[in-house]
Amino acid sequence: VRPNTAFLDELKEKLPEFFTKEGSFDLDKFKNQLKDKNVKELSEGYQLDFIGKDYARRQAGEMPSTVIVPDENQNQGEGENSQNLFFTGDNLEVLRHLQNNYQNKIDVIYIDPPYNTGSDGFVYPDSFEYSDDKLKDMFGLDDDQVERLKSIQGKSSHSAWLTFMYPRLVLAKKLLSNKGVIFISIDDNEITDVSMLCDEIFGEANKIADLIWTNKEGGGSSDSSFFRIKHEHIVCYAKDINNVTINGVEVDNKERYKLSDRYEKERGKYYLQKLGMGSLTYSKSLDYPLTTPDGTILYPKDNNHGKRAIWRWSKEKVQWGIENGFIEFKNNGGKYTVYTKQYFKVDNNGKHIFRTQRPMGILDKFSSIQGTKYLSTLKMDKTFPYPKPKELIMWLINRVETENESETIMDFFAGSSTTADAVMQLNSEDGGHRKFIMVQLPEKTYHINKNGKEVPTKGGKAAYDAGFRSIDQISRERIRRAAKKIREDNELTLPEDFDGSFKHYRVVKPVKQTLENIEDFDPNNTNLFTNMVDGFSSQSLEVAGDAAGEDTILTTWLAKDGYSFDANVEEIKFGNYTAHQVENNRLYLINEGWGADQTRELLNQLGTHQLNVQSVVIFGYSFNVAELRELENGLKQLDSKVTLIKRY
């Protein structure tokens, strides 16, 4: 187990007794404990293996190497009051960031990852961030094995796809709540691999279903040389299947009163069902005479095959039905027919109660054409190929039972943001407070040719011509247009607190100059020559959004420290210096300019309990050695314990 990994931190938290005081994991002690408890290693069975598996495991345990840059134009504007989140960036990095503040908090994850068809443009996109020597040392590889591992880069092989998906699914599992469910859309190219991958990560016992979605109308696709294919798969796994309840689906409204039904006084519409039936199994107790209102005697009518007929109800039940208006005699030309009145079930407000049944594993009510037609109503149909219909995602979300329609739904392959649209649509229909988290890589819709000109990509021309320079721009615009349509379509019934917006964050790597400044920084220097905070502004990071460096550092640290993105952050003044207090718990000092006066004022406020925090977190690059020592010594002298956390 290597140091400085998220996996190591997790082990320390759960199994501290197996760590030495130097921080090393004592594997022999752990093995002996297993033997003492009579736990034996699995000696037979099978497992999924592929080139890059050890590397993929390592990726799942790494800490993020990026920063979270808030889009202040969006977050202080239309998204100011929204609890929905949209991240632009590599979804692996976003998932790493969210491990601290969203672990065990996501109720439903739906993803539509690359299908690895060979024509969908998938190639292994992650760069190998270690040198060859480092790879050899990490995994015990020789030169040939290193070359084999690196051979998947830029390829669309099964191993490349599995290495890409493995760490993302490991991290996704940690985000799921104990009642959480993940749905993964995939086709036949990777259905076997994704099933084995999920068996390994989530456990075979936590597989809920492999749903079949008939996504094409008519005759299906003729891509295959052998069969016409008109379906895809949606693989469904639970974090813990013992905690999951799958909601049934409503079927026809011919739900009937039972004799003990507490709603029988609230009768509404009904339909008639013949009391007589041809006998499959003859019962003497159901073969008796009935007397009509005019005294005619009726027996069950034999069917055309000569079988003796019977009544559906017993003699006692028929008598009850006559007395309570559940039986109707119809005279047609002197011939009587006896019917039972089958009342639709209603609640106390007279509203029909529909019967529910376990949902089918074949979904045949939704097609890809629905998704394209809907995008055309938003004037975006040509900007994104083969969008999923929002009705499909709504149906999936509704299958997962939660306590009060306030679940959090995540999609880290956002595409055209169908999932976000589905969440907003559901909220508009039932007044729910579901929240979404979308993640989309800023894939460009163009490339630069040798003359330095922008040229649209093969599938990106329509989006490029519409003014979209990257896929994430399409995703965010879809949310805006969908929210506008929902408001227009539901003007009179839309809940007042309907959330039709989002907060936006970009997850990016610091630029080379900032990394070099960090590398060269000497905390023992008396003076600071470079303002390190500015290197994290959106301008320095060369992204839009108008975020100051302090905004980026604070946002990144809040996620690291487990705070949600709508945590209450309050500005605290110490003279002309602005600090940030979060939920009366932590005080963050990020900018330069802290001095003896600020330390004196901070100690005074802490000592007189005007300010109550448990820790002070500082951006070490903004403090010279004298300022730091003075602050450190002052906090140690306080009666109440306040921890100083220095970060570099």
Image (cartoon, grey):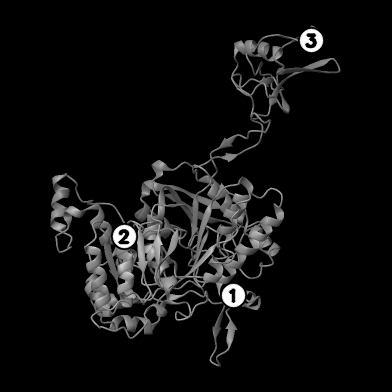
Which badge, 2 or 1, is on the more N-terminal residue?
1
Residue placed under numbered mark 1 in the picture: 459
Q: Considering depth in this image, is 161 or 127 the residue closer to the camera?
A: 127
351 shown above or below 192: above
The residue under label 2 is which amino acid type? Leu
Of discs 2 and 1, which sits in the foreground?
2
Q: Quadrant of residue 28?
A: bottom left
Q: Disc 2 to disc 3, how far (Cα)?
A: 91 Å
Q: Disc 1 to disc 3, how far (Cα)?
A: 75 Å
Give the structural element (helix, strand or loop) at label 1. loop
Where's residue 300, x and y in %? 70, 15
Residue placed under numbered mark 2 in the picture: 606
Marks 2 and 1 close (CB-CB < 8 Å): no
Where's residue 308, x and y in %? 66, 16
- Residue displayed at 51% across by 70% down: 71
* Tag shown at residue 293: 3
